Image (tube, grey):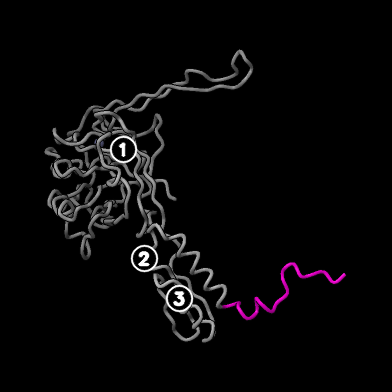
């Protein structure tokens, strides 16, 4: 499990016009009854740190933070790596030309610009660190045309490792509007995006604020289940694995090398754990069957 969330504290970057995060202790220390007790108050804008933009942020009839379907908040991820183009131009619009191949359907798109490396330095992350000023911001964002295409691909949500899905120079916030009108939640200031393995699943858990236009977001990536593993085994054992392994597994034989894995389609299904277990069992028994029944039990029976 990877944490794609920045901690909320005094250094956390908020939109220049937004109220930053604040927290204070209301209790801290030994109570009169003799035990330790701590509690605090916090306050902040809905739009800062790793956070959600609910559709109502840019679309009047859109869902608030409490109205987003949970099925939009969990799903397989698709990472749009545009680091190269963004490194050349800090005002780059991540567009269709940055995408190799087809865009999958029903995924959570994470736009990787590489801007996470500047966090938490406001000047380099936002392009400008003057409080309240937004006229000289500079960082990459998503091209509204590509946003439209993502909507057509029925993406569940879109995240980015910058302060806004629209680039810093944007004045019309078109990518926000396209996604908001289509009911697509947006995740901004996504942390550690360069470390997310391609086939990860994303779990987004924003604070469920009634009518909220967004809010603090805990974003997690579940790295893929064990991928293909390679074993060395003889023909007889290989034949047994093929006979005994569940049919939802992929088995590749080349010479004495056998590559096995639960097929990707099933790797996250409800039977995933069961299939992994059945595959392990087949592998173990196929390789050690003859030996296992003949060998003494472990620990070896005592001869005393
Ligand atoms: Zn926002």
- Classify mark 1 as within 8 Å of ligand 1 or not, answering yes or no: yes
Q: Nearer the viewer, residue 90 or 290?
A: 290
Q: Residue furthest right?
A: 304
- Label 2 Cα crowd, 10 Å radius (few <14 / some 14-19 / many 20+): some
Disc 3 element: strand
Q: Do the residues bearing badges 1 and 2 touch, measured as CB atoms within 8 Å?
A: no
Q: Tell me the quarter of the image containing the C terminus.
A: bottom right
Disc 2 element: helix
Q: Which residue is mark 2?
A: 264
Q: Nearer the viewer, residue 111 or 73?
A: 73
Q: Which residue is mark 1?
A: 51
**Of callouts 1 and 3, the N-terminal one:** 1
Residue 180: quadrant of the picture: top left
Q: Nearer the viewer, residue 167 or 150?
A: 150
Residue 119: quadrant of the picture: top left
Q: Which residue is mark 3?
A: 259
Question: What's the distance in space between the residues labelled 1 and 2, CA to CA?
Answer: 30 Å
- Magenta-colored span: 287-304
Disc 1 element: strand
Q: Which residue is located at x 34 percent, y 34 percent?
A: 207
Q: Which residue is located at x 43 percent, y 49 percent?
A: 2
Question: What's the distance in space between the residues labelled 2 and 3, CA to CA?
Answer: 14 Å
Q: Quadrant of ligand 1?
A: top left
Q: Position of residue 121 (x, y in %)?
A: 35, 38
Question: What's the distance in space between the residues labelled 1 and 3, CA to CA?
Answer: 41 Å
Left or right: 75 as drawn, with respect to 179: right
Give the label on residue 260, or none: none
Left or right: 59 as drawn, with respect to 107: left
- Label 3 Cα crowd, 10 Å radius (few <14 / some 14-19 / many 20+): some
Left or right: 114 as drawn, with respect to 257: left
Q: Position of residue 150 (x, y in %)?
A: 18, 53
* Residue 235 in view of the camera: yes
């Amino acid at each position: 499990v990877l944490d794609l969330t920045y901690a909320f504290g005094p250094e956390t970057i908020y939109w220049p016009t937004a109220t930053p995060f604040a927290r204070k202790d209301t209790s801290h220390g030994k109570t009169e009854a003799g035990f330790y007790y701590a509690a605090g108050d916090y306050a902040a804008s809905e739009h800062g740190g790793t956070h959600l933009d609910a559709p109502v942020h840019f679309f009047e009839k859109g869902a608030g933070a409490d109205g987003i379907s949970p099925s939009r908040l969990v799903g397989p991820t698709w990472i749009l790596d545009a680091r190269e183009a963004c490194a050349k131009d800090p005002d780059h619009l991540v567009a269709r030309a940055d995408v190799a191949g087809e865009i999958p359907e029903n995924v959570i798109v994470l736009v990787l610009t590489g801007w996470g490396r500047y966090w938490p330095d406001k000047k380099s992350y936002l392009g400008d660190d003057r409080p309240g000023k937004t006229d000289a911001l500079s960082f990459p964002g998503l091209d509204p045309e590509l946003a439209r295409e993502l909507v057509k691909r029925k993406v569940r949500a879109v995240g980015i490792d910058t302060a806004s899905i629209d680039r810093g120079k944007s004045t019309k916030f078109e990518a926000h509007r396209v996604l908001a009108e289509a009911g697509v939640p947006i995740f901004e200031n996504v942390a550690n995006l360069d470390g997310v393995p391609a086939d990860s699943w994303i779990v987004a858990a924003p604070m469920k604020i009634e009518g909220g236009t967004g809010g603090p977001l805990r974003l997690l990536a579940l790295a893929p289940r064990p991928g293909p593993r390679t074993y060395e085994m003889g023909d007889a054992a290989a034949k047994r694995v093929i006979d005994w392994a569940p049919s939802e597994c992929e088995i590749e034989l080349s010479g004495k090398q056998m590559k096995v894995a639960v097929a990707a389609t099933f790797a996250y299904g409800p039977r995933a754990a069961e299939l992994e277990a059945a595959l392990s069992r087949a592998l173990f028994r196929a390789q050690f069957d003859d030996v296992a029944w003949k060998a003494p039990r472990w620990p070896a029976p005592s001869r005393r």
